[in-house]
Image: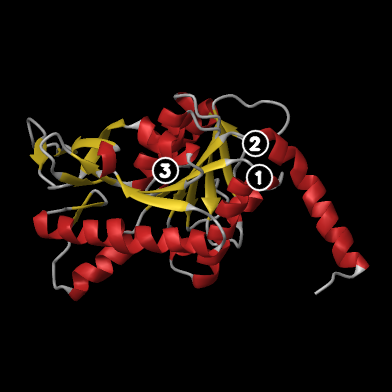
Amino acid sequence: MSLNRTEAATTTQVISRALPYIQRFAGKTVVVKYGGNAMVDEHLKASFARDIVLMKAVGINPVVVHGGGPQIGELLERLSIKTKFIDGMRVTDTKTMDVVEMVLGATINKEIVNLISNAGGKAFGVTGKDGQLIKAKQLIVSHQTPEMSVPEIIDIGHVGEVESINKSVIDMLVNSGFIPVIAPIGVGADGSSFNINADLVAGKVAEVLQAEKLMLLTNVNGLQDKQGQVLTGLDVDKVDDLIADGTIYGGMLPKIHCALEAVKAGVGCAHIVDGRVDHAVMLEIFTDEGVGTLITNQLSEGIL
């Protein structure tokens, strides 16, 4: 179907505005943590896949790290396996870990690969166990009350933290023209599996790759001030101030810490992105406005 003049002019204008960003990011790496509403809404899933394929088509190298907490919870419930959380982390015994590997490594990972393929891209799905991509160790959780003389160490099972990322595995996929899709399952020194927070994995992957951008898709508009206004264009010092005065708290803290660690380690910038917005990834990459909060190590002039 042909465009009328108005539609053609609008299309030309959009492409023209995107050109500086395409030139700016060509050949650069962008790590995207995929989760939240964008992962369960059918329209948003297709929108996300098209954005990732477009990035690859214009010379940007996207790397996708995905979560899957709600899907894991649903299957555990169907299997009558009880779930317990400590400090927001799922206690993961052997049975639960089997479900985590099934959901993350098989169901969700393959679905994302298929979505990208259907949008015309080439994706390759891996878990952190493939090629020892993510070496991990058990996460130690401690708890202390005023009555305790020493902290209590709590065993939360197969919940891990990243020890190292095998960059060569990702480089091999990218250099072969593939879009890596990574499930956040790590492997221990003895071959055991660990469930790792997807935001943390995305941050560590971005650090190792020295990515231009780290994008964390979430279910909120972005980081908000105490009046509910979205904050953006923040540097590290400003974010530290917002944590200190209590503006940043609760569930947003882990994402912010992840973003801070990444930019302090050399990642160009980090974005907390509203994944409920259609084409959120494209808007964040190719427009000035974006749809979330931008955090950099040092604010600079020009395109971020």
Q: Quadrant of the C terminus?
A: top right
Say few, some or many: other residues with alpha carbon within 10 Å of mark 3 (under 14 / 14 to 19 / 20 or more): some
Q: Nearer the viewer, residue 98 or 179?
A: 179
Q: Is residue 45 left or right of residue 230?
A: left
Comes first in the chain, label 1 or label 3: 1
**Residue at screen point 17% across, 55% down:** 97
Q: Which residue is mark 1?
A: 58
Give the amino acid at mark 2. Ala
Distance (Cα) linking label 2 and label 3: 27 Å
Q: Is residue 41 above or below residue 205?
A: below
Q: Is residue 229 visible?
A: no
Residue 59 at what x, y percent from top left? 63, 41
Q: Quadrant of the N terminus?
A: bottom right
Q: Nearer the viewer, residue 291 or 212?
A: 212
Q: Which residue is mark 2?
A: 26
Q: Are marks 2 and 1 in contact (CB under 8 Å)?
A: yes
Secondary structure beneath dot 1 equals loop
Q: Is residue 149 left or right of residue 84?
A: left
Give the amino acid at mark 3. Lys
Distance (Cα) linking label 2 and label 1: 7 Å
Distance (Cα) linking label 1 and label 3: 28 Å
Q: Are marks 2 and 3 in contact (CB under 8 Å)?
A: no
Q: Is residue 69 above or below residue 238?
A: below
Q: Residue furthest right?
A: 5
Q: Which residue is mark 3?
A: 255
Residue 302 at what x, y percent from top left? 73, 30
Q: Residue furthest left?
A: 149
**Residue at screen point 50% across, 56% down:** 220
Comes first in the chain, label 2 or label 3: 2
